[in-house]
Amino acid sequence: MRLTGFGFAGCVLRPGAMALLLLSGAAHAQPAPAGPPAVGVLQPTRRPVTESSEFLGRVEAVNRVNVVARVTAFIDKRLFEEGAEVKVGDPLYRLEQGPFQADLATKQAQVAQLQASLDLAKLTTERQRILLRGPAGQQSNYDTALANERSLAAQVQAAEAQVKLSQINLDYTDIRSPIDGRISRTAVTDGNVVSPSSGVLTTIVSQDPMYVTFPVSVREALDLRDRYATAGGFNAVVIRLRRPNGKLYEQTGHLNFVENTIASNTDTILLRGTIPNPKLYEAADVNGSVRELVDGEFVTVMLEGVQPVQVLAVPRSAVLSDQQGDYVFVVGADNKAERRGIQLGQSTSTVAAVMSGLSETDKVIVEGLQRVRPGQPVAPGQPSAQFEASVNNAAGDASQPKPPASGSAPGNSGNAPAGNSK
C-alpha cells in the first residue's frame, strides 16, 4: 500500500508500523478530570472513660523478718518445713538448752541464799530497834544492822535480775516465728553452732496483704496530683496489676503512701499501695497454700480513676501521627480537608479520647484518609455501614482505657499521608 499527500509518498507502511502510529495518536487523548475524593466523616461524641496510667512496679511483702540466733549454742533440731506458711509463735529452731538451764538454776540458788541472809538481817535490825528502848541499846548497833539489811536487799534485787537474764537466754534457745508468713529454706542445719554473729538462719515474709511499689517520674506525679488530689486523693484511684504472663490480677488495691523525697539519679518519686493476696488453694506438694503474688515479683501497675470522666471520643483509626504530634483531618470551609493537631488522653485500641484540639461540631474524616491531602477539596458523606458497626461495637471499649501509644493502630496501616496511622 502507498500513502500520498501525507509526506509519505513512495513509502510503504508495514502492518506493525501502522499499529504503532495508531497507539501514538491515542496517547495524546486526556482523561476527563475526576471529582473530589469521597470521604466518610463523623462528629466527636462525649463518652465516659476511666482514666488509667501504667507503671512498672514490684511486689513487696508488708513484713519481712530475718531470723537470727540471740545466744550461742548448738542447734538441736529444726522444727519447720522449708517453704511452708507459719503462724506467730510457731517453733522454728530448738537450741541446746542444758547449759542455760544450769545457769538459771545457779542464779536462782544465789537468790535463795541472799534472801536467807536478808531475812536474818531484818531480824537483827528489829532486835536492835527494840533494844534502843532500854539502857542496853546503842544507836550505832542499830544503824549498822539497818545498813546491812539494805545492802542485802540490794544484792537480792541484783541476783533476781540475773535470774531474769538467765531465763531470757534460756527462752532464746526456743526460736519461734514473730509474724505470720511464708518461711524460706534454712541456712544452718542441725548440729551446727550458731550465735548472734552467725547471720540469718532463715527469712519469713508476710503474704496477705502485699505492697506494690513503683517509681513515677516527677512530671507524671504532678499530673496525677492535679488529676486526683481534689477528687478524693488516694481514694480516687484503684490499683490493678498485670502479671508477667500478661494476665490481669483479679484483686484491686489502693494507694497508701508517697515518698517524701525525689530520687535525684532518676528524677522519680516512689508510690506504694496495698493489694490483697488471698489463698488460691491448698496443695500438699508445695507445703500448704498457694498464693498468686510473690515477694519481689515485677508487675505492671495500672492506676485507674474510680469515677469515669466525660471526654470527646473519635475512632482511633482516624488519629494520625508524625514528628509534630497527633492530628486528624477535618472538613473545613468549602469542603476542604484541614489538618488539626490534637492532644490525646486515656484511649483504647479502638477509641481515642481527645483532650484538646477538637469540638463537638467538627467533622472528622474517618474513612478515605489515604486519598486526603491538606487543603484538598473532598466530598464528605456518611461512613460505610461496616465502619459504623465497628464503631458501635467499640463503644463499650471506652471504659477500659489504655495510655496513648505512638505508632500505627490496627486497621489503618498505610492510610496516613504524612505520618503513621495512630
Image (spheres, rainbow, N blue to C red):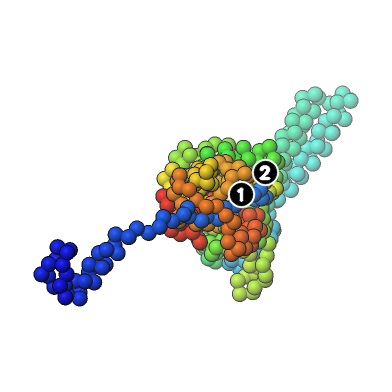
In the rendered structure, which disc, 1 or 2, sits on the residue that comes first in sequence? 1
Mark 2: which amino acid? Phe
Determine whether, in the image, residue 322 is placed left or right of residue 116: left
Mark 1: which amino acid? Gln
Residue at 84 percent across and 33 percent down: it is: 126
Residue at 76 percent across and 35 percent down: it is: 149
| 320, above or below 139, in the image | below
In the image, which disc is placed on residue 43?
1
Q: How crowded is mark 1: few (under 14 residues within 10 Å), some or many (20 or more)?
A: some
Residue at 62 percent across and 47 percent down: it is: 312
Asked which secondary structure carries label 1, the reply is: loop
Q: Nearer the viewer, mark 1 or mark 2?
A: 1
Q: How crowded is mark 2: few (under 14 residues within 10 Å), some or many (20 or more)?
A: some
Q: Can residue 335 be seen in this view?
A: yes
Q: Which of 208 and 319 is in front in this view?
A: 319
Image coordinates of residue 407 in percent, x first then y, are 46, 54
In the image, which disc is placed on residue 98?
none
Q: Mark 2 points at which residue?
A: 234
Residue at 58 percent across and 58 percent down: it is: 383
Residue that protrudes farthest toward the front in the picture:
5
Image coordinates of residue 56 in percent, x first then y, are 53, 52
Determine whether, in the image, residue 132 is placed left or right of residue 279: right
Q: Nearer the viewer, residue 364 or 290?
A: 364
Residue that protrudes farthest toward the right in the picture:
133
Asked which secondary structure carries label 2, the reply is: helix
